[in-house]
Image (cartoon, rainbow, N blue to C red):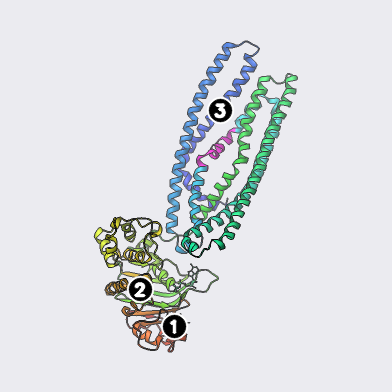
Amino acid sequence: MSTEKTSWLKTVIEPLRPVMRELLAASLFINLMALAVPIFVMQVYDRVIGHNGTATLKGLVIGVGVLMAFDWIIRTSRGRIMQTAALRIDVEIGTKLFDKIMHLPLRTLESRPASFWQTLFRDVDSIRNTVSGSTAVLLTDLPFVLIFLGVIFIIGRPLALVFVVLFVAFLVLAWRSGGAMKESTGKEKNVQQARDGLVAEIIAGRATVKAVALDRAIRPIWEEKQAGAIEQSIQRGAVNDEYVNLGQMLTMLGSVALTTVGAVFIMDHDLTMGALVACNMLSSRLYGPINQLVGAWKSFSSFRQSVDRLGEVFAESEERRHSAIERERPSGLITLEDISFAYDQKSQAAASIDRLEIHPGGITAVLGRNGSGKTTLLKIILGLYHPAKGRVLLDGADIAQFTRAELAGWMGYVPQECVLFNASIRDNIVYGAPGASDEDILEAAKVAGVHQYIIDLPDGYGTSIGEAGSRLSAGQRQRIAIARALLGNPPVLLLDEPSASLDRQAEEDLRTTLAELGKTRTVIIVTHSPVLLPICRDVVVLDKGCVAAAGPAAETLQRLFGARPPQQPPAQPPHPQSAPQPAPHVVSQPAAPLGGGVRIGVGGVS
Ligand SMILES: Nc1ncnc2c1ncn2[C@@H]1O[C@H](COP(=O)(O)OP(=O)(O)OP(=O)(O)O)[C@@H](O)[C@H]1O
């Protein structure tokens, strides 16, 4: 476990030092109590039997009875202390993890499968269970085996050598099993994660799986992953069994060796019968914890892996949590300067833009073929993707200095796939601007054209929409997402294919709404809709992540289509190079205003 990955745990555990001291004190007492029974037995053998010591026996029974009552009380207290500590650790790590995930950049979240992020919360459970369960008791008991070793040296000195040899043998076994278990548990976890990832994907796409009867194709993949998980689990079990059996054999061997050597010493009158019986009892207290270590490596390994995995995530760089400067609500002037963004180092840039300026007070349409980078561009403007080079300015201020919450408040976003949560309609709308009044929610829903539908429902705005909004149609989900984006009256609105799931009437309503909003705000829409395009003041045409053309909608579309911009343009604008009159000269004008509100600089033209 590298220190970098574990240092976070130290900061969580540090405040629990006083609790740990209490825990160690309780463990010390419990382990001292454990000496009571062997010493009692030794006294009975050596002082009561054969000496008719009934009075001594009574005294011993009362003494050991009182100690056992104390032992019970301390054990119960230790259990409570551990539960409290575990609860604090659970709350602390759970909150830290949630906050961390919420502040990770979108690309970091996208770089790993959903199952990985779910595993992290199970890691918190694993840490809590280890810290509060039998493994922790074992760990706190471990240092006290030295007490037993010391007592054995006092009461059964002739047997000391046997104990030392057995002690070392148990330690070697525990150490070897630790290495073997770490490796097999790691492999098991990896294959389980791969299988869980597949299951998560199947469940997320269950409608498609059913409709296309994908089960036939998926079954062999699942079977392979499931078989891999079973095989690794069996292998891990076999390794575990091997060491546990070795431990048990060593325990029996120790007992035989101890009794044999003890018998020889008793016959030579170097050891009493009581001392041999007591040493035998103490041997189980001595080897017990070390032997248990062999079986407990699975939870140790899981614990270590969980700590490492969480450590890796906690070490990831995160988005800004506090704003560098306080600023007023912006007016909505967006400038992109010298932007270059690629999804990964090997792939080509998904966005490469020298300069683009979008002014408030008009709607800008973003056009381009599938995969030309429209959604990527919106996410860069929103600050969801951080470009490797260049910057995005909002009213002249680099958006990198603002927090996600501030940017979300200034820029409303309707994504291509509208994701809603398993909550009421009201909650789903208000997520866009926590603290919004009921009037604001009603207004946003009316503007988004979903109010009438909602009030017709038996529970109105309180209607629960099911997992990911599954009880709503795609169009209804889209309208609620639009209402969510409008709430809080953001100066910038970005909508990705906002009418893709809307019927004609709803689309026309949306056109009226956007036309109104666009008078005072910066509205950017990715659309090819013949209903929405005519209200756009400007267009930006993308090709392979670069701006192929930009300027006033009428002129630019005319150039691209070789005629007046159609009232109902085709769903996909032609590739600029294949258009009858390509417009590279427009984009090559050095940062000159192109009329309307869009300005564009040199470069970025394919
Ligand atoms: N998460 C991702 N990881 C890697 N590559 C991606 C990712 N998302 C998009 N891309 C790639 O980036 C390019 C631009 O994708 P983007 O989604 O921005 O295109 P688009 O113009 O919005 O497409 P569409 O019209 O189909 O919605 C595509 O080549 C795509 O393969």
**Mark 2, residues whose alpha carbon is within 10 Å: few (<14), some, or many (≥20)?**
many
Describe residue 36's horizontal placement relative to residue 373 as left or right: right
The residue positioned 55% from the left and 14% from the top of the image is 58
Q: Which residue is mark 2?
A: 524
Q: Position of residue 406 (x, y in %)?
A: 35, 63
Main SS, magenta residues: helix
Inspect this view and state whether residue 477 appears. Answer: yes
| Mark 2 residue element | strand
Q: Give, as a single range, the part of the protein colored magenta.
A: 130-144
In this orientation, which residue lies closer to the viewer: 589 or 299? 299
Q: Determine whether label 2 and label 1 are within 8 Å by CB.
A: no
Task: Name the amino acid, label 2.
Answer: Ile
Task: Name the amino acid, label 3.
Answer: Leu
Q: Which residue is mark 1?
A: 574
- Numbered disc in front, either 2 or 1: 1
Q: Which is nearer the N-term, disc 2 or disc 1? A: 2
